Amino acid sequence: MIDFDLTEEQRLLEQSVREWAAREVAPKVHDLDREHRFDRGILPQMADLGLLGCSVPAEYGGSGMDYISLGVISEELEYVDTSLRVIMSVHAGLNCLSLLTWGSEDQKRRYLVPQAQGRKIATYGLTEPAAGSDVRGIQTVAVKKGDRYLLSGEKMWISLADVADNFLVFAWSDLDKKKQRDPSGISAFIVERAFKGFSSGTLKEKWGILAGNTGFFKMDDVEVPADNLLGRPGEGFKIAMFALDQGRFTVAAGATGLIRACRDASVRYAKERKAFGVEIAQHQLVKEMIAQMESDYQAARLLWLRAGYLKNHGRRNTRETGLAKWFATVASERAAGDCVQVHGANGYSDEYPAGRFYRNCKGAVIYEGTREIHKLMQADYVLGYRADKATRCELPPYQEKVNQ
């Protein structure tokens, strides 16, 4: 039997996150966006609600929620502002779930526990100035020196770059394989901001997600203990792809929330604004745009729920998660454009949220796999050029319990 209903616990979570975001964040979003300012005070509030460690089991300081709950949180947060969902993507999705799955017991105790509790904030460092979709094009290197690695390189377009305490960094640890562009030469490392030779900065000229922190960080022979190698040497590419499966899931659910925000704002405005003697909601072409938003919202939500279901049951979901991310982000861009159109000239004004939705939606169409990359992936699946292994995914401990 297929059940599309949330559990009672998930509905309560949805309600609590929705009420908190509406009460504590929504009234400030306009000013934060206008001032290009990240509100650090949001982080302890999210920690108190158990959001930052939502998918981490209680034994490691988290709330022990499942993937559907992570999706619900992401959708509700982006309904208010994309910057909130980004926090979940990089901290909870890309970083914490990678540590939970690949980390040693010592690494989980030293890094995952404080991150899940919100005492430390974490992010993910893969993209570089000249390497985005082409992961093998990264130039960051890690040279082994005794019981340490010396990391050198620069990461770009990093969410929370100037805020995070801990960074999951990918670098070439085998320089011969780097020359051959063999991804088995890439390793993953846990890097602390406090390590000597580490520096970061904020990008000031962004176009969207203005209430979020996005920047870069540089490493100049940063000494990283060998114990901070995540997984085994050469497993970095595999870990990076695993992490992207988690991050793309939060992006898909978040973009679904943005579609809903565009729909609700459009409905509200269309019933208030009059033209030619009637509410513009009565005009057929306005109805068409709102109907498209509703159709896209329902489809996007089903896609991320499907991916979440597979994740909860430990089944390979790269194809389904990629499809959910691609569809939802492209649909959110369409919804945001139509939201501006429904608002007419007022959609071009900063006094209404339509412009912010339009600015915010574009980033997700690009990061964590561009629209074009996801199109190629889905085509290759259909054509038989690409196939995921049928084996079960490695599961976090709490998920093993879910399946028993």
Image (tube, rainbow, N blue to C red):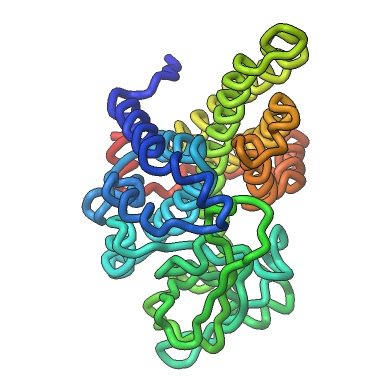
Looking at the image, can residue 315 be seen?
no
Q: Which quadrant of the rendered structure holds the N terminus?
A: top left
- Expressed as whole percent of the image width and height from the top left, the position of residue 294 reads 61, 19
> Eyeballing the image, is 338 above or below 150?
above
Residue in the picture at 51% in, 52% down: 32
Q: Would residue 51 appear left or right of 352 to someone viewing this image?
A: left
**As rendered, which of 201 and 166 lies closer to the eye?**
201
Q: Would residue 106 appear left or right of 392 to someone viewing this image?
A: left
- Expressed as whole percent of the image width and height from the top left, the position of residue 112 reads 33, 61
Q: Which quadrant of the rendered structure holds the C terminus?
A: top left
- Expressed as whole percent of the image width and height from the top left, the position of residue 115 reads 33, 60
Tally the numbered discs. Answer: 0
Residue in the picture at 76% in, 38% down: 379
- Expressed as whole percent of the image width and height from the top left, the position of residue 91 reads 43, 56
Residue 382, by quadrant, is top right
In this view, which residue lies farthest toward the bottom? Answer: 146
In this view, which residue lies farthest toward the left? Answer: 59
Residue in the picture at 68% in, 29% down: 339
Looking at the image, can residue 355 be seen?
yes
**As rendered, which of 176 and 249 lies closer to the eye?**
249
Residue in the picture at 58% in, 67% down: 215
**As rendered, which of 76 and 399 lies closer to the eye?**
76
